[in-house]
Amino acid sequence: MASELIETVILALSMVFLLTTGAILVIKGQNKNDKAQIWLGVSFFSLLILYIVWGLGLFERYYTVYIIQLFVFIAATFFGKAAFYQNRKSAFPYIMIGTILVGLIQVIQKVFEHHGIFPDFFAQDYYIHIDNLLSILWTAIPFGWMAHAARKARKDLKTQDVEPWILRRLTLIEISAVVEIFVSVPDLIKHAIDVNWDQSMWYLQIAIITTFTVINFFAWAMPSWFKELLNKGKKEKTVAQIESEDETKMSEDAIMQELMEVYQT
Amino acid sequence: MSEVVKILGNNLAEILDKPSKASRGLIRLAFKDAGLKEDLDKNKVSLEKTLEVLNGSLKKRLETIKVEEPEEIVGELSNIINKYQSIFTMSK
């Protein structure tokens, strides 16, 4: 009873984190003209709907969950494109095609299962393993790409003079994307081994979902104390240093003059 | 300090072998010329707008200070900001 209450509270808190993060992303994306943040916000809202529908078993037609999941993954892939690969060659078309293709396979097999088409196939012992492996592959395509893109962007930006919290935000995105890839692994383990680990695997799945939502909340809500924490190790500058490097204090004439003088000498 | 200005200004300084403070100032002036000063100050600029600024007002500013081959410099800066484009989303 107590453990049920704890898991309900944890899941409810995760949903609150998802809702808050999604709202922050959509509002900030609109205010700051950032399509990438809007796409990620849409993905989080869809994920919230998915968890509610899945958690409460709201639909008799179970394939509805997979249709919502397809929206989550498509929006996450658009985030990757908008944040990392605008005007650049990337694997985006292949990732999108792969995400939609595997997603449609998942949806179609659930529709068939629901309507009793090919019952012999769905009754086979191996079917559940194929289903679980497909789920892992499906999650790994968009989130694996997201993790890869965030890692590459962090490595590139490391060569530039940027605030440490920005690099660490990229690390958080990378970690959360990797964590999300494992969300269906407990289902695979549960069915693959001959031990009754149903409850343990359920807890593991809750832990993965919670870790993903909490990391993303802190990465995107970025409370000021957390930003300061991520900025630890930043080289502190004296007031005189800051002022001497501040270009906003320079007049237009001074800028043009200095550049022309130096260029002509 | 705007991270976009820092990246563009510091790289411009390296390309031109000029002081980075003045180069960052030139980037700010280019945004101001394009009517995007407020957007820059509020961290609202996008990659598309930045590329427009580089190819428009920054190019003119480079011509004013008589830099050789401003077209090439602007092209190089466009490649640089494309490479580091995640800064637009990650710094907001």
Image: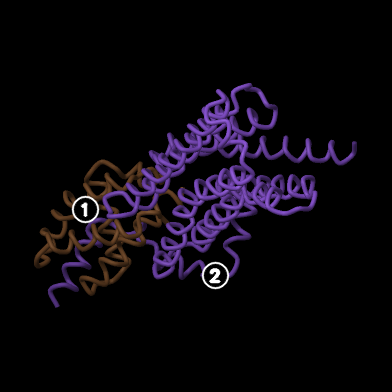
Chain colours: A purple, B brown
| Category of crowding for the residue at label 2, using alpha-carbon neighbours closer than 10 angstroms: few (below 14), some (14–19), many (at least 20) | few
Question: Residue B61 sits in which quadrant?
Answer: bottom left
Left or right of B8: which side holds A262? left
Q: Nearer the viewer, residue A251 or A219?
A: A219
Residue type, label 2:
Glu
Image location of residue A240, percent across then percent down: 47, 69
Q: Nearer the viewer, residue A4 or A158?
A: A4
User: Marks 1 and 2: same chain?
Assistant: no
Q: Quadrant of the C terminus of chain A?
A: bottom left
Q: Which residue is mark 2?
A: A236
Question: Residue B86 sits in which quadrant?
Answer: bottom left
Closer to viewer: mark 1 or mark 2: 1
Left or right of B44: which side holds A197? right
Left or right of B47: which side holds A109? right
Q: Which residue is mark 1?
A: B54
Q: Is residue A98 above or below residue A259?
A: above
Most distant residue in the front direction: A120
Image location of residue B57, percent across then percent down: 18, 50
Chain letter for mark 1, please.
B
Residue at (35%, 61%) from the top-left corner?
A247
* Label 2 residue SS: loop
Residue at (12%, 66%) from the top-left corner?
B67
Residue type, label 1:
Leu
* Label 1 residue SS: helix
